[in-house]
């Protein structure tokens, strides 16, 4: 399987990229000795849990029906349920005061929402009935309404330092380019408009929660802005290809079939922005992580990750 081929252990890792995710890179930059272990791994027990846990799931969404077609995905409500179980373990291990102190100083990263658009509202053919009765604005409001409850629940479970990433320019991913050929060589406009509409409401939500939840240090990571800049100015970042998938099988942009054992892989992954039809390469993730770590208020608001850690 090509996924994970450039990861330190050179093996499939459950990550949809050739190497590390943005969270992996941020963890390394902040001094974590190990990659945060997945919640479902049998080895994620005992003292290991106190170093942090990864609850992410492929195809998971804010809305519970997102990614239905993919079967065993874990949506955000269930991810938070899993965190609640971890929290109980931390309390039983350390006692309530020390556990709450640990959670208050811990960094929480919530990167979700693109699947709700790509694999739900924008799914070719399957989404046609829903789009006939639910406007883009109504769908975005449903996402924001659900997400508000989920972030408040995280806060009530003890999270205080929360990085909330917005949705990137999904109209520029190889999958959207290939399934919307009328856009030619440009990014596809409607998915990007939906992402921007959602992102505007998400920023409002972050500001609302910051003012209403005492002690909440919630930051808004503008991944859309960062990734759009990387695509538009890819040569400045050292990339040569910003529209074609490095791991591909078919399609003008290599975006029609997910990366798998039969896929072809580009020889130099460091020159590609996109690893597969949907996700960035390790090299692109490094560029994004650097901007989140040390970026200005345009990249991440009202403070960057390094400042959040020290807050």
Image: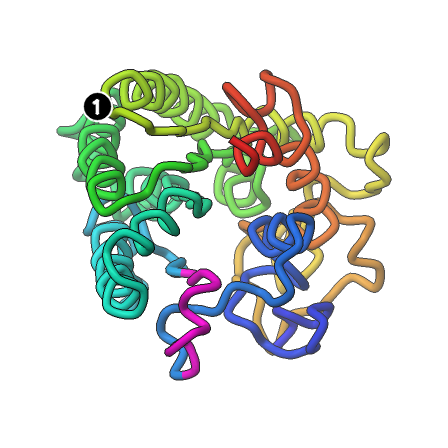
Residue shown at 48% from the left, 26% from the top: 192
**Position of 16 compared to 282: left or right?**
left
Q: Is residue 276 visible?
A: no
Q: Nearer the viewer, residue 64 or 176?
A: 64
**Position of 2 compared to 109: left or right?**
right
Q: Position of residue 265 (x, y in %)?
A: 73, 66
- Residue 272 colored in magenta in the image: no
The furthest residue to the bottom: 42
Residue shown at 46% from the left, 26% from the top: 220
Q: Pointer 1: what residue?
A: 135
Q: Position of residue 55 (x, y in %)?
A: 37, 60
Quadrant position of residue 276: bottom right
Residue shown at 68% from the left, 26% from the top: 229
Quadrant position of residue 44: bottom left
Q: Nearer the viewer, residue 244 or 45?
A: 45
Q: Residues within 10 Å of mark 1 (few under 14, many from 20)?
A: few
* Residue 52 drawn above or below residue 241: below
- Residue 45 colored in magenta in the image: yes
């Amino acid at each position: 399987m090509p996924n994970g081929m450039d990861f330190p252990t050179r093996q499939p890792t459950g990550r949809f990229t050739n190497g590390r995710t943005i969270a992996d890179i941020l963890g390394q930059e902040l001094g974590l000795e190990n990659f945060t272990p997945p919640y479902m791994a049998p080895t994620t027990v005992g003292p290991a849990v106190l170093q942090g846990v990864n609850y992410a799931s492929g195809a998971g969404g804010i809305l519970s029906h997102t990614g239905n077609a993919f079967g065993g995905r874990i949506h955000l409500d269930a991810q938070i349920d899993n965190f609640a179980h971890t929290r109980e373990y931390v309390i039983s291990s350390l006692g309530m005061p020390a556990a709450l102190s640990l959670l208050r100083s811990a960094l929480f990263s919530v990167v979700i929402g693109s699947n709700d658009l790509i694999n739900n509202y924008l799914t070719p053919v399957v989404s046609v009935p829903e789009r006939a009765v639910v406007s883009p604005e109504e769908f975005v409001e449903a996402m924001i309404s659900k997400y508000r409850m989920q972030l408040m629940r995280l806060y009530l479970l003890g999270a205080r330092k929360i990085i909330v990433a917005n949705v990137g320019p999904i109209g520029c991913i190889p999958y959207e380019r290939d399934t919307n050929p009328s856009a030619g060589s440009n990014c596809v406009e409607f998915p990007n408009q939906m992402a921007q509409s959602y992102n505007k409401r998400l920023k409002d939500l972050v500001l609302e929660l910051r003012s209403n939840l005492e002690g909440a240090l919630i930051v808004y990571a503008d991944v859309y802005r960062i990734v759009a800049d990387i695509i538009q100015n890819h040569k400045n970042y050292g990339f040569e290809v910003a529209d074609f998938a490095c791991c591909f099988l078919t399609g003008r942009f290599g975006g029609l079939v997910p990366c798998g054992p039969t896929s072809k892989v580009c020889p130099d992954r460091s020159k590609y922005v996109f690893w597969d039809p949907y996700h960035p390469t390790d090299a692109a993730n490094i560029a994004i992580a650097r901007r989140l770590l040390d970026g200005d208020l345009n990249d991440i608001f009202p403070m960057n990750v390094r400042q959040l850690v020290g807050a």
